[in-house]
Amino acid sequence: MTSPGELERTLRENLRGEIDFGAAARALTTMDASNYRRVPVGVVAPRDADDVAAALTVCAEAGVPVVPRGGGTSIAGQATGVGVVLDLTRHMNTLVSVDPAARTAVVQPGLVLDRLRDAVRPYGLTFGPDPSTHSRCTLGGMIGNNACGAHSVAWGTTADNVTELAVTAYGGTAHRIATGWDGAPAGLRELVTAHLGLLRTGMPPGFSRRISGYGGLDALLPEHGVRVARAFCGSEGTLGVVTEAVVRLVEAPRAPVLAVLGYADESAAAEAAAGLLPHGPLTVEGMAQDLVGDTAARLPRGGAWLFVEMPDEGAARALLRAADAVDSTVVTDPAGQRALWRIREDAAGTATRMPDGSMAWPGWEDCAVPPARLGAYLREFRALLAAHGLRGSPYGHFGEGCVHVRIDFDLVTAPGIARFRTFSEELADLVVAHGGSLSGEHGDGQARAELLPKMYGPDMIRLFGAYKDVWDPAGGMNPGTLVRPARLDENLRFAVLPATPFAEEVARCVGVAKCRTTDPGDGASVMCPSYRVTGEERHSTRGRARLLHEMLAGEIVTDGWRSAEVAEALDLCLACKGCRSDCPVGVDMAAYKAEFLHHHWAGRIRPLSHYTLGGLPDWLRLIARLRAAGAVNALARRVRVPGLDRERGGRLPDLAREPFTRWWGRQPGSAGRPGAEGESGAVTLWPDTFTQYLNPAAGRAATQVLRAAGLSVEVPTAGRVCCALTYVSTGRLDRARTVLRRTLDTLGEPAGPVVVLEPSCAAALRADLPALLPDDPRAARLARAVRTFAETLEQYAPAWRPPRLDREVVGQTHCHQHAVLGDGPDRRLRERAGLTGELSGGCCGLAGNFGFEPGHHEVSVACAEEQLLPSLRAAPRNAVIQADGFSCRTQIAQLGGVRARHLAELLAEGL
């Protein structure tokens, strides 16, 4: 076999696309969204079909296998491989053409599904199959897995919606396949002719979700029209590489309506699902209480629910009258529907977390049975889980009998892996006993291919092998998948990790890749701003988690905590914490980055910005003690501060002449003096670094508003208190712990809530403080006491009426507020004050020290250009601009040229 170095050189000589055999590129593609890990020799991003043919020719001559890869969201391991990975998303991601009259589109394999749907929406059309990963899965991946989604009950699987495929086989031979034998590989017609009897009688009884194996082979029968393209769908990259596809489009419903039906339990919902099909639903999705959790309060009464989308309100009302549900509701509002669908779409990640915080894993993610059998199957499935001491929360496409579930397998210890195998074998028997399919949507990959003989029998398995050999006689396409498969308990991704808490955290990333969306959306999601700006996997939350995984494994990334590859990927992480709330499994890349930087720079001289920006509280405190703010401001206008980005002028915002606590000490009601008349209920106003030294006007305004609301305000002035945010963000964790212990010693036991005006500081106290000092009970108590400004007014002065401002408001919701604190109280307070409109979502791009650090300016500005700056340009002239975060206000001032204010300042002006 050709050496990796020779293979890389030959590929570079023959392709125009990128060839990367480096550690980072290989590390990023070792895993998909499954339990499996295989290490490739290199990654190729072909520019077009000619590049694909050249790559497959070179690899065939070298004897190196190839695995095509789209969004990498496959849950059975089929998007991992030991040879060359073809990344079809970087260049081959175009919508070639749309024919609205014929209702077809020509697409390249790397095109993301939502981009296709967005493009055809103006014609009143859509692509029917819609997996929950629609914002990042690709058409090529959907073809490979024969993906389905919630609407397949109405519009079928991907195979039902593909009419023609351009395919390149291993070795470089091109095929154009559709209906009939034209373009098919030599020997395929003869193979089918020789096995007509087996194809007619050997397949399990057909139902819509028979996706396992080469389950579409009977489409090659003459009575089925010899649909070669349909039979190719679901082949999981084992036959060839799709370079172009003609897909069928369907008419999108003009105003779909969501009917939500509540049932006593899961079995009742499952048994009811099949009876709803005659009413013509577009979806029939099911889930039970153990998956929905606290969001059940937003649903009708019941212990399980069916989400049934109907074409219009009349059809939905008719369905409710016919359904035998405990309770029901109809949701016509599109925003309300999106909120409920988000529960379902996030289930692939939500189901990964058990109620006690432990993790559950894929492996039996999408088996399916005929819908009429679903109720009985689920009862036996739950019993099988209990018999093995396992837990899982089934949900899925109940209208088609397809069940998703993640199970708390122990995939680390030998007994746990043995139980995983035994359970898998018994569950396969159960599915087959109910006439089902081991895979009902996502393919078999390595997770279930070994068990296909239970479903198909030896003769059909031999035919599968022959079919593979007709397309791929050299066996170079994605070996170990579907045909002659690897064992289901081999190549598990957890085996390479050390037994450490940090490794357990990194392993939380299951690869569902919600962080890979390029659409900033409607403000409901913040992550991952650097990925949306760069489009590079290494700058996504998943990409960074994969690099950390491989750093800990030590096989590809071999220099551990000193890894340059990991440092480079984390360098553009804004530590926005968006992943903490938006990632379905709660990956907290900001915390991982801090841990990495802590180890990476241990015992070494750090970058200058870690001392200037990371030590900002100490510098500002020293300047205030010397009463040198004026002199420092004057000097900073002439001399660039070392360690700061030149694009920002090398300077920080001006320092306040008088710190907030110095002003506070001169006020009536401070230092034990009586407060204003009518004050009651003590609150502690936290003098965070930004309010204290850079924007004390926010602190003064908050004092005025809190007192007007009848609250007694106290401010810690006897010593130094700090949330240690800047030390955490630069990975100086030992220093952060020291600062936090000193803070706890100084603060003592706060009387009542602790009001923190700066969202990033509030988030640090609420989340980072207890994580850094888990053994200090004072840390947990302070974290529980922390309130935002709006939370304080809502909880402790509920009868207070804020002044009416009656203005439109624009600005920025701080990313840490979105991720850790929530902004519900802020929205309600703005509404009561007559502030109309919405603040921008996403991230402002400055992100504390990030935007001031050298090399980050371009990304920082690009993040601001996503939502924030366009909203400022579109704002009415008399709109007020609000941003509670100091970073957000600074970014608005420097890039938008306008002044933003804290909500407390806006309310104080109206008093």
Image: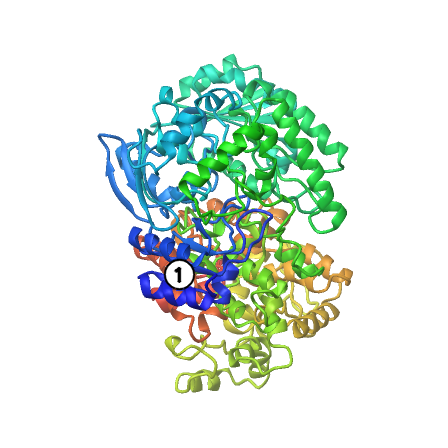
Q: Is residue 160 above or below residue 698?
A: above
Q: Is residue 70 above or below residue 845?
A: above
Q: Position of residue 271 (x, y in %)?
A: 59, 18
The residue shown at (39%, 61%) is: 534
* Of the pair 252 and 693, the residue shown nearer to us: 252
The residue lying furthest to the top in this view is 322
* Of the pair 630 and 138, the residue shown nearer to us: 138
* Of the pair 353 and 18, the residue shown nearer to us: 18
Q: Position of residue 55 (x, y in %)?
A: 37, 56
Answer yes or no: is residue 766 visible.
Answer: no
Is 154 on the left-hand or right-hand side of 272?
Answer: left
Among the 4 quarters of the image, the one containing residue 777: bottom right
The residue shown at (69%, 43%) is: 409
Answer yes or no: is residue 639 visible.
Answer: yes
Q: How is the image coloured?
A: rainbow
| Dot 1 alpha-carbon crowd within 10 angstroms: few under 14, some 14 to 19, many 20 or more | some
Q: Is residue 433 above or below residue 136?
A: above
The local secondary structure at tag 1 comes to helix
Is 809 on the left-hand or right-hand side of 904?
Answer: left
Q: Position of residue 212 (x, y in %)?
A: 52, 33
Residue on which the image places disc 1: 534
Is 391 on the left-hand or right-hand side of 761?
Answer: right
* Numbered marks: total: 1
* Of the pair 851 and 427, the residue shown nearer to us: 427
Is 20 on the left-hand or right-hand side of 772?
Answer: left
The residue shown at (58%, 20%) is: 327
Residue type pointed to by label 1? Thr
Q: Position of residue 685 (x, y in %)?
A: 62, 62
